[in-house]
Image (tube, rainbow, N blue to C red):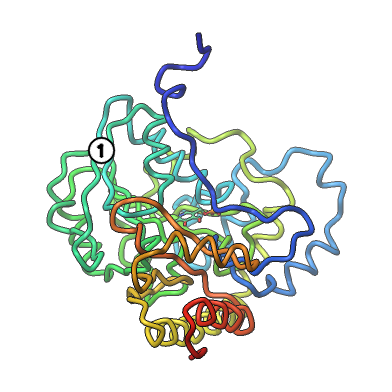
Amino acid sequence: MSYLRKHIDAMAAYTPGEQPAEGEQVIKLNTNETPYPPSPRVLQVLRQTDWSILRKYPDPMAGKARRAAARLWRVPPEQVLCGNGSDELLTLAMRAFVGEGDRVAWPTPTYSLYAVLAEIQGARAVEVPTEIDFAAPLDALAEVDARLLLLCNPNAPTGVWTPVEKVLDLADRFAGVVVVDEAYADFGPASVIPAVKDRENVVVLRTLSKSYSLAGLRFGYAVGAPDLIAGLAKCKDSYNCDAVSIEVASAALEDQHWMRENVERIRVERTRMADALSALGFGVTLSEANFVLAAVPGGDAAGLYTRLKSRGILIRYWNQPRLEDKVRITIGTPEENDALLAAIADLMGKETP
Ligand SMILES: Cc1ncc(COP(=O)(O)O)c(C=O)c1O
């Protein structure tokens, strides 16, 4: 007999990208981290922080970081909620907007955590297939009868971006709340935040894990209408952001220049990688994120993943419909990307492009 609730007992847990063992040297291109260090201001904060702050509970609303995010997007702080990574904010959205048995929708394929969170909540998933080119199925999504729609933009693991006007149109037509997960938006053309900040049914999620090089910090924030933000806040833990992360996140948000420079480096490499992989015969989906999804020539993506792993290079592979012949490759430093291309070319018996 299990002590777990029936549906928790039955469900599969979320599978994160694998982490190398401590001390193991690998080229890690599997979890969409940025290969460059965080802003020097972050390091300065870590060095200068008065460690007595750890003795006391942190600000429950992470006010300093909240105000930094609010200044960045020119919204009142009441329209921002900070969280322990955007994963926590996704959990809060599920808690706040979706009851047991309610419907929650997303296009597939997308970030696989959505399905896990819906299952934990006991919600009913409505999975709407993306178009043949992985474009968001906007008309079908607009018509779905669901309390919540999760739209990852740019999408993971495809990198496909839905333009701002189309997101606005979808939000107008969809009857429930639209959560736009912008984990990768800094690598793309634009954020929807300036256009949707006054919409009553939209919440946008941002993270410092990717473009700000702070995946280890665990910090994200939501921007949306004051009522929705207040509702999300009701569902959070009392002190969901720790005192150090509040200081560090505030400093990182204030150094836009550093973030932008790193993003630009990644975008240049993204183009180079897409061209080089295409030259090797891969079918590369046009990406606006810090990774590319690439169809492996001959289709043996699992084999490529395993062979690269045995050479100390980690990329991501999913054995699921529409992805089983593809791999997702995070854009690394030029040197890491060169090593990956050389390894792939060698495995294929081709010249490195
Ligand atoms: C689409 C998407 N949303 C959210 C997250 C979670 O980000 P965080 O580190 O802020 O929890 C990820 C992480 O991989 C992601 O790919």
Q: Nearer the viewer, residue 350 or 150?
A: 350
Q: Quadrant of residue 19?
A: bottom right
Residue marked by disc 1: 147
Local packing at callout 1 (Cα closer than 10 Å; few below 14, some 14-19, many 20+) is some
Relative image position of residue 83 (x, y in whole percent): 56, 47
Q: Residue at x 32, y 27 (%)?
A: 99
Horizontal side of 91 relative to 141 (left or right) equals right
**Residue 91 in the image: above or below residue 161:** above
Horizontal side of 127 relative to 317 (left or right) equals left
Q: Nearer the viewer, residue 179 or 286?
A: 286
Q: Residue furthest front?
A: 349
Task: Indicate the secondary structure of the residue bearing disc 1.
Answer: loop
Q: Amino acid at mark 1?
A: Arg
Horizontal side of 172 relative to 295 (left or right) equals left
**Residue 228 in the image: above or below residue 98:** below
Q: Is mark 1 within 8 Å of ligand 1?
A: no
Q: How many marks?
A: 1
Relative image position of residue 264 (x, y in whole percent): 52, 84
Q: Residue at x 60, y 53 (%)?
A: 219
Relative image position of residue 244 (x, y in whole percent): 74, 52
Q: Residue at x 63, y 68 (%)?
A: 311
Relative image position of residue 217 (x, y in whole percent): 67, 55
Q: Residue furthest top?
A: 1
Q: Nearer the viewer, residue 338 or 9?
A: 338
Q: Nearer the viewer, residue 302 or 66?
A: 302
Q: Residue at x 35, y 54 (%)?
A: 110
